[in-house]
Amino acid sequence: MSLVVIKAEVVRRLVHTDPDQAALQAADIETVGRQALTEIREAVTGYRPRDLDAELTHARSALADAGIEMSISESAEELPEAARSLLGWCVREAVTNVIRHSHARKCTISLRVRDGIAELQVRDDGAGGAVGSAGTGLRGLAERLSAAGGRVDAGPVPDGFTLTATHTGATVIRLLLAEDQQMMRGALALLLNLEPDLEVVAQVSSGDEVLAAARTSRPDVALLDIEMPGRTGIDATADLLAELPECRVLILTTFGRPGYLRRAMEAGASGFLVKDAPVENLATAIRRVVAGERVVDADLAASALSAGANPLSGREQDVLRAGVDGSTITDIAVALRLSESTVRNYLSAAIGKTGTRNRTEAARVAQQNGWL
């Protein structure tokens, strides 16, 4: 990523003085970015939970190699698939702890389902060790189970050490991800799918695709970028909530502009976060909006309060937006079906409200504040 940042700086400096060299550097950025995404995919694949049966087979082999006798007791009732994946992680961590810390001679693994709750217990006859001595493994395991509505209890018992993990069958949160940058979208989907209670069920690259994808996939939460081809994320929020009001919307953006925040909240979004926040923060925000909370980036909220409301009327926004591409007064008038004198009046009012000297500066200030 450091290389990407450096090359991006080179592109910025050369784009006007040496466009050909800038294009070559931009191509390098794309190559490096794709390589990085491949490496991310390979890395996170190693953290995906294995199948429970495979973990039990591995545990039997590892314990035998360590000279530890193993027995397994399994429930006659079929474990839910979500529980099998999570309990596979538990078997891996617990058996590793037995081999490294217990000095045990025997280890018993039991699996059962009672009243819809799946339970795994790993018990050994060794000295065990304090829970904290297992390092971050048990802590990470406890966090993973907690996120899925379960829990982990571990500690010494009179004749050894026991780890008990339970899974209550918590509902997985279904996500729709709308992001026009393919590499960003792919990386976010991979990382979110690593969370035990989150699943990306639909991905789209434009605002125009959001509603159709939501109708098909029925997400619990839609994660929408603001600036996408077609309709913006804010426009798509209003469309989505008008038809699927039970869906929650989290706006994700590179541009932390106060006006965007206000408009997103007015459209009905439940949260607003910048993309450079850690994915752990995003996962927590998703769970919070599902629970009925609003989640807004603290710095952006403070900026929105200090910036005040959008001073531009709807028509003033329309004429500024229509003129961003350099359109003439006549072009704007035709596009908006207004007279040229009316367009001039709206532009004059917008210039005055933004404290600028001309319509180009007014449009820039309005964009920087998220008013357009």
Image (cartoon, helix red, strand yellow):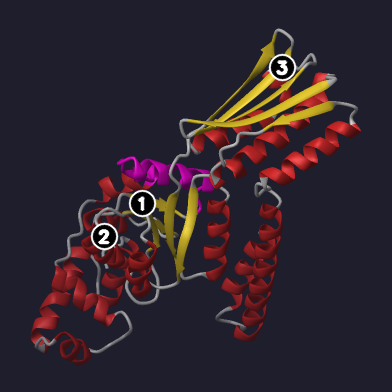
Q: What residue is pinned by disc 3?
A: 161
Distance of label 1 from label 3 (alpha carbons)? 45 Å
**Earlier-in-chain disc, 1 versus 3:** 3
Q: Is residue 76 above or below residue 308?
A: above
> Which residue: 32% across, 45% down?
301
Residue 272: which numbered mark, if any? 1
Q: Amino acid at mark 1?
A: Phe
Residue type for callout 3: Phe
As for residue 26 lying within the magenta part, the answer is no
Q: Quadrant of residue 26?
A: bottom right
Residue 281 higher or lower than 228, as above or below: above
The one of 31 and 163 positioned closer to us in this rendering: 163
Comparing labels 1 and 3, the label whose residue is closer to the camera: 3
Going by the image, does 40 lie left or right of 256? right
* Along the line of sight, the residue nearer the viewer: 53 or 1: 53
Residue 228: tell me if it is visible.
yes
**Label 3: which secondary element:** strand
What residue did someone put label 2 on? 244
Q: Nearer the viewer, mark 2 or mark 3?
A: 3
Provide the residue span drawn in magenta: 276-299
